[in-house]
């Protein structure tokens, strides 16, 4: 396992960045208004993040130990594409998403993160990005359209006219594939409303009402059936194709969902096992003596193999 990891590990705006030489992340300011209009490229190099793990009896054991959650993770994400972070529970998926989204203390995160080769301040990253959590917090008695209009009123500039906000909401409804549910209430356990997949898409809509450059999502397909999960990722593909960078964690994508993803990072115990195009997965694992059967789900095979190697003597070589 570690041999695969070792072979592959290296493989207008503003961001918080680290020096890349192992020193903590620091903040540098760049004028967002002076950056030219061009394609966006988010790059991250050698991201490393460790935490102190406490012990129940520190006086007897000598105190806590350090656990590395991310170990030298590098990669890139472009506008127009979906970057998916895969791995088993505890692999570091959510931690990597949090690190890229500036949700980890910069004093403890080491590495380098840039957007178009420029570092970006925390306040600017917040304004040009959105973070969608796993859990939906919506008003059950509002319709889909009312929910998005409510978000538009609070999140879009006060100087923007009501008609322009309404136009933005209507465009978002189409982008998210919610046209048939526009007048349906959100609902809850006591009131029938939209489906689980539609509910998740509404949550995404609330967070992207301001049309962010970068969209981070922590397992957006979690808890959904295969059809609903596919519809979520299909909507994310449309969002990416509109000019956004979409970065999401996902546990195990189906064959159909894999076809919508542009780049993959597969993690194991905080380390990179694979980074690259989905179409190159078969060749990559074949080179290490683990060919993926032709009709097999590539990511399912890869994740199952990683799990097996983690628990075997071969995985420590």
Image: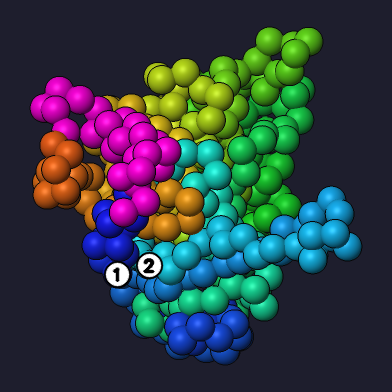
Percent position (x, y) of residue 271?
A: 42, 57
- The residue located at (76%, 22%) in the rendering is 141
Per the image, label 2 sits on a secondary structure element best described as strand
Per the image, label 1 sits on a secondary structure element best described as loop
Residue where numbered disc 2 is placed: 74
- Residue extent of the magenta highlight: 292-317
- The residue located at (43%, 49%) in the rendering is 268
Residue 74 colored in magenta in the image: no
108 to the left or right of 281: right
Residue 282 shows up from this direction: no
The reply to whether discs 1 and 2 touch (Cβ–Cβ < 8 Å) is yes
Q: Is residue 91 above or below residue 67?
A: above
Structural distance between the alpha carbons of marks 1 and 2: 7 Å
Residue where numbered disc 1 is placed: 10
- The residue located at (22%, 51%) in the rendering is 277
- Looking at the rendered image, the quarter that the C terminus falls into is bottom left
Q: Is residue 84 above or below residue 18?
A: above
């Amino acid at each position: 396992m570690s041999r695969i990891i070792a072979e592959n590990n290296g493989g207008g705006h503003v961001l918080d960045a680290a020096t890349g030489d192992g020193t903590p992340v620091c903040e540098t300011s760049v004028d967002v208004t002076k950056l030219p209009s061009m394609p966006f490229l988010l790059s991250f190099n050698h991201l490393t993040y460790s935490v102190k793990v406490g012990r129940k009896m520190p006086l007897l054991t000598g105190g806590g130990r350090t656990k590395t959650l991310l170990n030298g993770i590098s990669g890139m994400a472009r506008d127009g594409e979906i970057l998916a972070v895969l791995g088993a529970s505890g692999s570091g998926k959510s931690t990597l998403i949090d690190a890229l989204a500036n949700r980890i203390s910069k004093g403890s995160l080491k590495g380098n993160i840039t957007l178009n080769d420029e570092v970006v301040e925390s306040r600017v990253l917040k304004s040009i990005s959105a973070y969608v959590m796993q859990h939906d917090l919506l008003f059950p008695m509002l319709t889909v359209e009312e929910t998005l209009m409510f978000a538009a009123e609070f999140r879009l500039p006060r100087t923007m006219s009501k008609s322009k906000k309404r136009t933005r909401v209507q465009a978002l409804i189409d982008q998210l594939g919610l046209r048939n549910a526009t007048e349906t209430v959100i609902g809850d356990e006591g009131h029938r409303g939209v489906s689980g997949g539609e509910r998740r898409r509404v949550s995404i809509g609330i967070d992207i009402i301001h049309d962010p450059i970068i969209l981070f999502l922590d397992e957006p397909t979690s808890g959904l059936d295969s059809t609903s999960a596919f519809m979520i990722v299909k909507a994310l593909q449309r969002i990416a194709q509109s000019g956004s960078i979409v970065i999401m964690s996902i546990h195990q994508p189906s064959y159909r969902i894999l076809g919508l993803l542009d780049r993959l990072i597969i993690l194991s115990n905080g380390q990179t096992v694979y980074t690259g195009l989905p179409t190159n997965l078969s060749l990559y694992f074949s080179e290490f003596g683990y060919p993926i059967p032709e009709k097999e789900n590539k990511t399912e095979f890869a994740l199952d193999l990683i799990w097996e190697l983690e628990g075997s003597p071969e995985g420590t070589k």
